[in-house]
Amino acid sequence: MKKVITYGTFDILHSGHINLLRRAKEYGDYLIVAASSDEFNEIKGKKAYYSFEQRKMILEAVRYVDLVIPEHNWEQKTTDVKKYNVDVFVMGDDWKGEFDFLKEYCEVIYLPRTVGISTTKIKEDLNKR
Ligand code: C2G
């Protein structure tokens, strides 16, 4: 079984996230999503609208996702890749190059982001109404 992993906050799930998850799943048979914990979001300077538990539950309902685990810090990726026998690490290309150190353990793929949508834009647009 070919296992894929990706990381992110995935707050207010939108088509950009779904495009990423769908394409990530195409690289294998099993997709793990490491969703940022509320505490790690603070470290990332993000205030998610949905709690970790809500974001986890929503991600688990996505057809492409097989397992959701918590992302607690920047350092856990190597451990996760080994622990879950991951073959492919996938991220949007806003992170291009940032995780190349993982190439020692698995394939590293950066996919083009979906243009024109983001959780920040959704929040801004809703505030304008
Ligand atoms: N994404 C995308 N297109 C968008 C918005 C997001 O492809 N329009 C992708 C991002 O590139 C990322 C994933 O969806 O791969 C999740 O996005 P975020 O929740 O914003 O994740 P981020 O805060 O970048 O967290 O350790 C890695 C970090 O946890 C990544």
Image (cartoon, grey):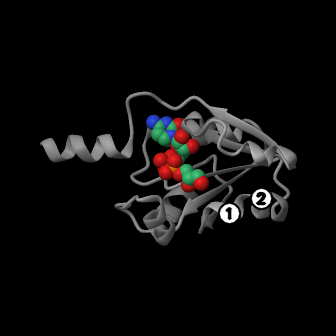
- In the shown orientation, is residue 76 left or right of residue 123? right
Asked if residue 49 is positioned above or below residue 24 in the image, the reply reads below
Q: Position of residue 28 (x, y in %)?
A: 78, 41
Residue 16 seen in the current view = no
Give the labeled residue for mark 1: 75
Mark-to-mark CA distance, 1 and 2: 7 Å
Disc 1 residue crowd, few under 14, some 14–19, many 20+, Cα 10 Å: few
Disc 2 residue crowd, few under 14, some 14–19, many 20+, Cα 10 Å: some
Quadrant (top left, top right, bottom left, bottom right) of the C terminus? top left
Front residue of 95/66: it is: 95
Q: Say if disc 2 is inside 8 Å of ligand 1.
A: no
Q: Position of residue 96 (x, y in %)?
A: 62, 35
- Judged from the image, the secondary structure of the residue bearing numbered disc 2 is helix
- In the shown orientation, is residue 28 left or right of residue 14? right
Q: Residue at x 44, y 49 (%)?
A: 13
Asked if residue 90 is positioned above or below residue 81 in the image, the reply reads above
Give the labeled residue for mark 2: 78
- In the shown orientation, is residue 96 left or right of residue 5? left
Asked if residue 67 is positioned above or below residue 96 in the image, the reply reads below
Asked if residue 84 is positioned above or below residue 17 in the image, the reply reads below
- In the shown orientation, is residue 83 left or right of residue 72? right
Mark 1 in CB contact with mark 2 (< 8 angstroms): yes
Amino acid type at circle 1 is: Glu
Q: Residue at x 66, y 35 (%)?
A: 110
Amino acid type at circle 2 is: Thr
Q: Residue at x 43, y 66 (%)?
A: 42
Residue 93 seen in the current view = yes
Q: Residue at x 48, y 30 (%)?
A: 114
- Judged from the image, the secondary structure of the residue bearing numbered disc 1 is helix
Q: Position of residue 90 (x, y in %)?
A: 68, 42
Quarter of the view holding residue 34: bottom right
Q: Position of residue 45 (x, y in %)?
A: 41, 59
